[in-house]
């Protein structure tokens, strides 16, 4: 007999509501309630009523076909016909990650419509497709970081079966799938979890309010909720890895940190399934413990985003110094990011007005993901400007070359590779008019000192704001976008063909630069990346070995190899092999 269960430790009575029937549930150990279902209710949509209140969705709902406020629908994961039994993802050290938002990646905006573009991604050289959060969130459009039904793939994207079709199709194309998950907060719209139990605690505060309860009273089942969620995506949906959003907002003073517990359980699942699984953290702590193995006293995650690389590169090529970019902007900062990972690794941060971070010791560069654009760094700007809206193509090519030849795992954001004209502003679809207005006003306040005219800030609730983020795929076939796409393709081919460029050993990466002359050179084994960011030609002094050094790729004509220097035109980059 099929049963339904729910954790509601403080409820005096819990009823299961299915169809027109209401079944009283039986309380068991640890605050769990259970109801055995008669056959005619087994496959009906259902909800739970606590102490006679209106029914609300299952906290572990596998599908919300009517959205965050609707009834839950049961799913039998055993019925899907998978075809990927021989699939094993490539090692993260050889990865090229491609971050995409399902709703705007294609005009269809669904899991199934993404499948139509997988051949393009595979041909580009992508190895891992990273999906922005797909857990059920309010409305039909949104970034996904305000999810509330964490076990349910979003109904508007196609739901559980469609997500499985996408993952299966990715594997058939040789593409691994990373799913972005949010374990640091819940969205405000449709969040019924506090009615069931102490999922939140006031012991800590986050930018979104109360923190997730991972170390306070009754936290054992809350930790189990998130670990089970992670294991479910990896097991039931054949996802290859998870990207954990903003782990710096996960507060846990327990002896075994939640991240360590999660890493250990994922490793056990990996052994059971017989296929590799990965965990990648987003963190602004500059804390290498996150990716240090458990055996060495770390949390045991496989990689983390390196925001310092992004900030150093962005501030250098754009000249921007607002907000956290005030801490960056020099060639020295970029050199430190490339050779030592974190720019702020125990040094004073003027922006934070305190010492920040700690040094990276004895870790490979492939423990860190680098990018020049991502959803946050684009979408958290007032108008959602991409880097190509701020700088010209010469600088864009230099930035792309530095990112794709760095000793880290590179990541692209959808459309970046052809310098897409579409922006990626923040967008939502809340039905509560008060919440919608609060979000609008919040965006206006956030950028009040950065824009003269608040009217240029897109309305997050407007369908037009969402539509403006959709990619126009026809751009990739016409100039000037096609030339940028060819540049990216050439860089990716070079990274694949020259072992030095994908080598994560930081001790084989050397950087020379002259701040005043604006030239920058990165030595990666027997490969050399030379940049001239100045408005004038530069003679870049380099130690060239005897033999036959040659230029493998150049952003401009007129680059020449001299006796002891590379002659560079203004704002150009070249990649050479020296052996």
Image (tube, rainbow, N blue to C red):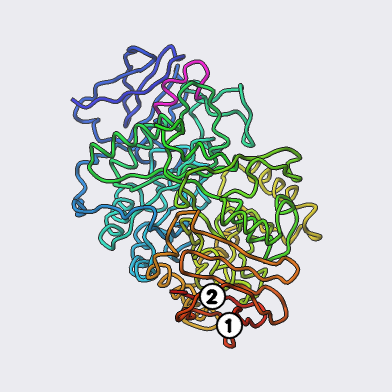
Up/down of 494 relative to 33, above or below:
below
Local packing at callout 2 (Cα closer than 10 Å; few below 14, some 14-19, many 20+) is some
Q: Secondary structure at mark 1?
A: loop
Q: Quadrant of the C terminus?
A: bottom left
The verdict on residue 34 being magenta is: no
Residue farthest along the front direction in this orientation? 546
Kindly identify the residue that appears in the image at 50 percent across and 75 percent down: 545
Residue 422 appears at what percent x and percent y? 57, 68
Q: CA distance from mark 1 to mark 2?
A: 8 Å
127 left or right, relative to 505? left
Labels 1 and 2 touching (C-beta < 8 A): yes
Residue 457 appears at what percent x and percent y? 70, 58
Q: Quadrant of the N terminus?
A: top left
Give the mark count. Answer: 2
Kindly identify the residue that appears in the image at 43 percent across and 40 percent down: 301
Residue 113 appears at what percent x and percent y? 37, 63
Q: Which residue is denoted by mark 2 in the rendering?
A: 544
Q: Secondary structure at mark 2?
A: loop
Kindly identify the residue that appears in the image at 53 percent across and 35 percent down: 184
Residue farthest along the bottom direction in this orientation? 558
Residue 319 appears at what percent x and percent y? 73, 64
Up/down of 47 relative to 423, above or below:
above
Kindly identify the residue that appears in the image at 67 percent across and 68 percent down: 390
112 left or right, relative to 10? left
Q: Which residue is denoted by mark 1 in the rendering?
A: 563
- Mark 1 or mark 2, which has the lower sequence index? 2
Up/down of 444 relative to 392, above or below:
above
Q: Nearer the viewer, residue 508 or 148?
A: 508
Magenta highlight range: 214-225
Local packing at callout 1 (Cα closer than 10 Å; few below 14, some 14-19, many 20+) is few
């Amino acid at each position: 007999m099929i049963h339904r269960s729910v954790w509601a430790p403080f409820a005096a009575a819990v009823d299961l509501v299915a169809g027109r029937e209401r079944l009283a549930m039986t309380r068991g150990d640890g605050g769990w309630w259970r109801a055995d279902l008669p056959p005619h209710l087994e496959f009906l949509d259902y909800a739970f009523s606590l102490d006679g209140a209106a029914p609300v969705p299952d906290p572990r709902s596998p599908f919300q076909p009517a959205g965050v406020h609707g009834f839950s629908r049961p799913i039998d994961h055993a019925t899907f016909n998978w075809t990927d039994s021989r699939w094993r993802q490539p090692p993260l050290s050889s990865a090229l990650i491609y971050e995409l938002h399902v709703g705007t990646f294609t005009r269809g905006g669904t899991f199934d419509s993404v499948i139509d573009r997988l051949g393009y991604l595979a041909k580009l050289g992508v190895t891992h497709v990273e999906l922005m959060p797909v857990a059920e969130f309010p409305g039909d459009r949104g970034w996904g970081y305000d999810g509330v039904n964490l076990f349910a793939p979003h109904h508007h994207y196609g739901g559980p079966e469609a997500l499985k079709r996408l993952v299966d199709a990715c594997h058939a194309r040789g593409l691994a799938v990373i799913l972005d998950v949010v374990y640091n907060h819940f969205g405000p719209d449709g969040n019924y979890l506090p009615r069931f139990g102490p999922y939140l605690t006031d012991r800590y505060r986050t930018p979104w309010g109360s923190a997730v309860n991972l170390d306070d009273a009754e936290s054992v089942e809350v930790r189990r909720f998130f670990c089970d969620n992670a294991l479910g995506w990896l097991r039931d949906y054949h996802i290859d890895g998870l990207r954990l959003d903003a782990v710096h907002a996960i507060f846990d003073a327990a002896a075994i940190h939640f991240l360590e517990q999660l890493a250990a359980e994922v490793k056990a699942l990996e052994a059971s399934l017989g296929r590799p699984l990965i965990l990648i953290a987003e963190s602004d702590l500059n804390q290498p413990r996150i990716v240090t193995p458990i055996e060495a006293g770390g949390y045991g995650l496989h990689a983390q985003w390196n925001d310092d690389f992004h900030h150093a590169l962005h501030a250098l090529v754009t000249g921007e110094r607002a907000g956290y970019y005030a801490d960056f902007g020099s060639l020295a900062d970029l050199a430190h990011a490339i050779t030592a990972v974190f720019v702020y690794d125990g040094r004073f941060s003027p922006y934070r007005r305190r010492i920040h971070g700690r040094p990276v010791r004895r870790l490979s560069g492939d423990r860190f993901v680098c990018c020049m654009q991502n959803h946050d760094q684009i979408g958290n700007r007032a108008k959602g400007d991409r880097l190509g809206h701020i700088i010209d193509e010469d600088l864009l090519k230099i930035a792309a070359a530095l990112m794709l030849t760095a000793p880290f795992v590179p990541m692209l954001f959808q459309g970046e590779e052809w310098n897409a004209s579409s922006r990626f502003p923040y967008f939502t679809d809340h039905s509560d008019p008060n919440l919608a207005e609060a979000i609008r006003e919040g965006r206006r306040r956030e950028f009040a000192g950065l824009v003269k005219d608040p009217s240029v800030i897109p309305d997050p609730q407007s369908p037009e704001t969402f539509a403006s983020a959709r990619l126009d795929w026809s751009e990739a076939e016409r100039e000037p976008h096609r030339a940028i796409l060819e540049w990216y393709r050439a860089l990716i081919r070079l990274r694949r063909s020259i072992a030095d460029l994908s080598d994560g050993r930081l001790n084989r990466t050397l950087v020379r630069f002259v701040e005043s002359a604006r030239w920058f050179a990165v030595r990666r084994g027997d490969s050399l990346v030379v940049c001239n960011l100045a408005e004038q030609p530069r003679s870049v002094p380099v130690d060239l070995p005897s033999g036959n050094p040659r230029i493998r790729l150049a952003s401009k004509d007129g680059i020449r190899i001299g006796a002891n220097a590379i002659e560079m035109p203004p704002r150009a980059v070249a990649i050479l092999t020296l052996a």
